[in-house]
Image (tube, helix red, strand yellow):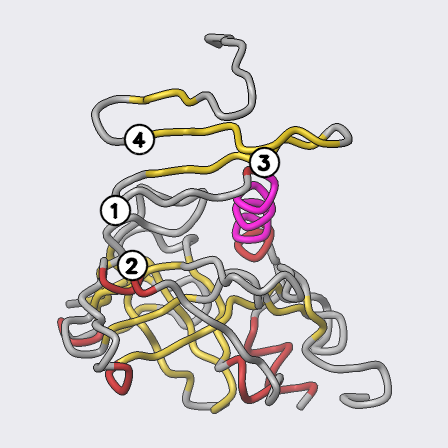
Amino acid sequence: MLILNRKVGESLVIGDDIELKVLEIYEGKVKVGIKAPKAISVLRKEIYEAVKMENQESLNATKNPLDVFVKNK
Amino acid sequence: MKIKTKYLGDLEVSPEQVIKFDSGLFGFEQYKDFALIDVAENVYFKVLQHVEESYVAFVLVNPWDFFPDYDIQLSDDELSKIGIQANEENDMLVYSIVTLGDSLKNSTCNLLAPLVINTKNNRGKQLIVMEDKYTTKHKLFQEEIGE
């Protein structure tokens, strides 16, 4: 992993069209501004991981939805 | 075409039933072509079945059937990736993935990351909603109902 030091107000440029700017550092939190093309989606990693895990878990279900939905309805 | 399904045996599906998820689902980016299958015995859920890998099948519900107050905002930029423009919302279907438990009471619904399908061009995408209040696990039924 590439590690760079940045101060508030300074930026990083990734490729031609992505810019990350450090806007504020306060009480252990960094506020980051992101400028990127609309086609690039930006997500908090923990949310992305949670959705991935849930998709996996829903596939792993061993019950047949017919049994669960029809018989319990 | 005939496909092998996870829950419903072999089925004949028409090309119009096949939805293309160009970027797959989160964690399942390699699976792009899914058939959206109605289940004759039950109107409350559908199965999103990958056309080749039978074990890749998701159980879907219409989130508003279970969560009438579900209120989400979807990014116009994300929607435009499947050809949905802001003034064409009527051509869009929204489904939530269910994680089945041993009963409906123990089953949950992912309200954080619904599937959106553009019915005009049969393209779909899993999106993450902007609202913080939704998570990947909402109980389909509260304790007192569904007994």
Q: Are labels 2 and 3 assigned to the same chain?
A: no
Three-letter amino acid code of the residue under disc 2 = Asp
Three-letter amino acid code of the residue under disc 1 = Ala
**Closer to us: B64 or B2:** B64
Q: For mark 2, name the chain.
A: B
Residues drawn in magenta: A46-56
Look at the numbered discs 4 and 1 and tell me whether their residues touch, using CB distance below 8 Å.
Answer: no
In the rendered view of the protein, which quadrant contains the C terminus of chain B?
bottom right
Q: For mark 3, name the chain.
A: A
Count neighbours of disc 4 (C-alpha within 10 A) and say few if under 14, some if 14 to 19, many if 20 or more.
few
**Closer to us: B26 or B127:** B127
Look at the numbered discs 2 and 3 and tell me whether their residues touch, using CB distance below 8 Å.
Answer: no
In the rendered view of the protein, which quadrant contains the N terminus of chain B?
bottom left
Count neighbours of disc 1 (C-alpha within 10 A) and say few if under 14, some if 14 to 19, many if 20 or more.
few
Marks 4 and 2 sit apart, C-alpha to C-alpha, by 16 Å
Could you say whether the residue bearing mark 2 is in a helix, strand or loop?
A: helix
Whether residue B51 sits left or right of residue B132 in the image: it is: left
Would residue B99 be visible to someone looking at this image?
Answer: yes
Q: For mark 1, name the chain.
A: A
Mark 4 vs mark 1: in front: 4
Look at the numbered discs 2 and 1 and tell me whether their residues touch, using CB distance below 8 Å.
Answer: yes
Which residue is the site of mark 3?
A31
Residue depicted at 52% across the width and 45% down the height: A52
Look at the numbered discs 4 and 3 and tell me whether their residues touch, using CB distance below 8 Å.
Answer: no
Q: Main secondary structure of the magenta part?
A: helix
Q: Check residue A39 in the rendering and tell me which mark sits there, or answer none.
A: 1
Mark 4 vs mark 3: in front: 3
